[in-house]
């Protein structure tokens, strides 16, 4: 029964009959976006500054805090794996300490100096608590742990931002704009996000480690995140 409920939430778009006061802020949709796959522990280019997913833009100890390789560890090699509906697309060979439904977007508000200086004016929730008191504190990212709704066809999933990229780190118009502009990134098929193995499974990607188009996404407030496997383990850490 629990599995049936989870699948219904993922594949069915249910009308929201809550009053406006019970809902979060409305954020704009970004449509026709290409996504690539990444996972905690992956090293896809050891010679690149951003070629390792053992760390993230917001957490220098991402691998440790997550609980290890988000896939199959063989020696020093961490490989992804295909996920299954019947276990909520969770990793099959390890127990995550943080949410396996994670993604990145091309805006780093901690390490890019201009972004840090301007984030109070750019990030839509910067004037809300608890973010308002953290805008000037570089220890806190205003992006880390934020919720995102993703759709592909009839599938609907939710994840948390845990990194910045791909390829760009200051794409303000794409990430926060209301006019559905294209991502500035031209690498990796012009991808506008990387998504975790749990999200690739949830959205029904054909390739466990490839490039997939046709994604729609938007930010959502926590109050608008429905029950589902993405709430089994919620990431709340500040990072490091």
Image (cartoon, rainbow, N blue to C red):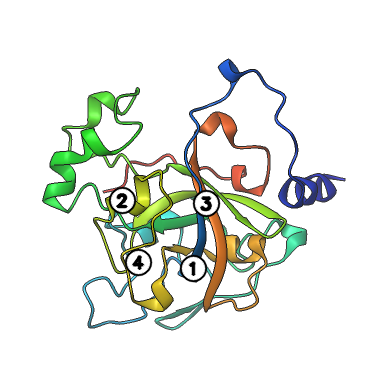
Query: x, y percentage for residue 153?
Result: 68, 60
The residue closer to the viewer here, 176 or 98, is 176
Q: Is residue 100 visible?
A: no
Q: Which of labels 1 and 4 is toward the front?
A: 1
Q: Which residue is mark 1?
A: 34
Please report the residue visible at 59 percent of the width from the left and 61 percent of the height from the top.
Answer: 198
Q: Mark 1 and mark 4 in contact? Answer it, CB < 8 Å.
A: no
| Residue designated by label 2 | 173
Left or right of residue 24, residue 51 in this image: left
Measured Cα–Cα span from mark 1 to mark 4: 11 Å
Q: Earlier in the sequence, mark 4 or mark 3?
A: 4
Give the mark toward the camera: 4 or 3: 3
Q: In 3D space, how far apart are the residues under numbered discs 2 and 4 (Cα atoms)?
A: 15 Å
- Residue 217, which numbered label? 3
Q: Which mark is residue 166?
A: 4
Q: Earlier in the sequence, mark 1 or mark 4?
A: 1
Judge whether residue 126 can be spotted in this image: yes
């Amino acid at each position: 029964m629990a599995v049936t409920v989870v699948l219904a939430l993922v594949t069915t778009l249910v009308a929201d009959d809550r009053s406006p006061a019970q809902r979060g802020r409305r954020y704009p949709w970004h449509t026709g976006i290409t996504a690539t796959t990444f996972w905690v522990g992956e090293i896809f280019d050891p010679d690149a500054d951003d070629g390792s997913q053992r760390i993230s833009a917001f957490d220098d100890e991402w691998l440790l805090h997550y609980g290890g390789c988000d896939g199959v560890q063989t020696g020093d090699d961490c490989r992804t794996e295909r996920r299954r509906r019947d276990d909520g697309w969770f990793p099959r060979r390890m127990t995550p300490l943080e949410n396996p439904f994670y993604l990145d977007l091309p805006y780093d508000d901690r390490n890019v100096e201009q972004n840090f200086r301007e984030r109070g004016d750019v990030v839509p929730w910067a004037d809300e608590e608890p973010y308002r008191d953290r805008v000037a504190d570089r220890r806190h990212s205003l992006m880390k742990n934020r919720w995102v709704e993703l759709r592909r066809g009839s599938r609907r999933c939710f994840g948390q931002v845990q990194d910045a990229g791909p390829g760009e780190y200051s794409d303000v118009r794409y990430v926060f704009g209301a006019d559905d502009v294209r991502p500035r990134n031209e690498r990796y098929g012009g991808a506008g996000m990387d998504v975790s193995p749990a999200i690739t499974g949830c959205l029904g990607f054909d390739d466990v480690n490839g490039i997939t188009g046709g994604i729609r996404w938007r930010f959502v407030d926590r109050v608008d995140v429905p029950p589902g496997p993405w709430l089994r383990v919620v990431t709340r850490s500040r990072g490091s």
